[in-house]
Every structure is written in C-alpha cells, then in structure tokens.
Image (cartoon, rainbow, N blue to C red):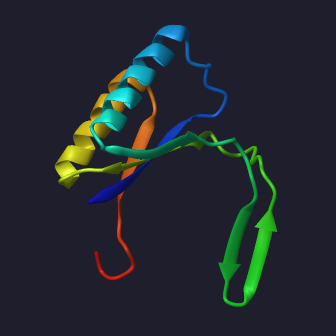
C-alpha cells in the first residue's frame, strides 16, 4: 500500500541545523535502500490557492498572512500496512521535532 505523508510546521520555523540534516539524510537513505521511500521533497511556502463552488472557480495568490502553519514537505512511501506507515511517520517526527504529519493512503482510482 502506498501512503502520502505531508509535513506541516509553523510558518517562519527555524531552518534545520547540520545535525538534523545528517540524521534526516541517514533516515532517507535507509528508507530508500529498503524500497519504502518512493519520493520525497520540500515544498515552497505560499503558492496559489484554487477553490471551486459550483461553476465559480477562484484563484488567490499566496502567501497567506493568516496562515500559522504550512505544509512544507511530503514523502510517498510503500508500506505493508497503515501501522507500518504510522511507524515511519513516528520515526520522522522524532528526527524532525515539533510539527505535524498527515498520513493518507493513496488509491489507484479503481477502489484501492
């Protein structure tokens, strides 16, 4: 099963230090070598927000000053179960520190 994990942190959070970067690099290498990590990346803050209501579609350019948190990164992982995906996220959070990660199962559009 594939899971998309997104990471949310406070807007304006401090940049990671060298120790955190080294720990994260080792974690990413471990998951990649094990075939668990399929893709990962950081996300630029802001960006346009596209919303629809009926036939009306609005585009609002970011950044959004009211936002206290932003999604700053993602990982696409392949795990045997939701519990395994949660454990991957727990390990990530132990390295990354304060913040929040959301885990969503990815389905293929054919029901799972």
In the drawing, does residue 86 fall left or right of residue 68?
A: left
**Measured from the top left, where is residue 29 in percent x and y?**
38, 28
Outermost residue, bottom direction? 55
**Measured from the top left, where is residue 56 in percent x and y?**
75, 85
Which quadrant: the C terminus? bottom left
Q: Quadrant of residue 37?
A: top left
In the drawing, does residue 67 fall left or right of residue 88?
A: right
Res. 93 in view: no
In the drawing, does residue 20 fall left or right of residue 45?
A: left
Is 55 located above or below residue 82 in the figure?
Answer: below
Res. 51 in view: yes
**Measured from the top left, where is residue 2 in percent x and y?**
32, 58
Query: Closer to the camera, 5 or 41?
Result: 41
Q: Residue at x 40, y 30 (%)?
A: 28
Q: Quadrant of residue 67?
A: top right
Is 56 located above or below residue 2 in the figure?
Answer: below
Which quadrant: the N terminus? bottom left
Q: Residue at x 69, y 42 (%)?
A: 45
């Amino acid at each position: 099963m594939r899971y998309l994990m997104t990471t949310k942190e406070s807007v304006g959070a401090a940049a990671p230090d060298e120790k955190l970067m080294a720990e994260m690099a080792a974690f990413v290498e471990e998951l990649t070598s094990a075939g668990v990590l399929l893709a990962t990346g950081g996300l630029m803050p802001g960006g346009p927000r596209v919303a629809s209501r009926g036939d009306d579609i609005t585009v609002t350019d970011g950044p959004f000053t009211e936002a206290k948190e932003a999604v700053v990164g993602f990982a696409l992982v392949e795990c045997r179960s939701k519990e395994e995906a949660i454990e991957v996220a727990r390990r990530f959070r132990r390295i990354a520190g304060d913040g929040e990660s959301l885990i969503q199962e990815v389905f293929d559009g054919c029901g799972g």
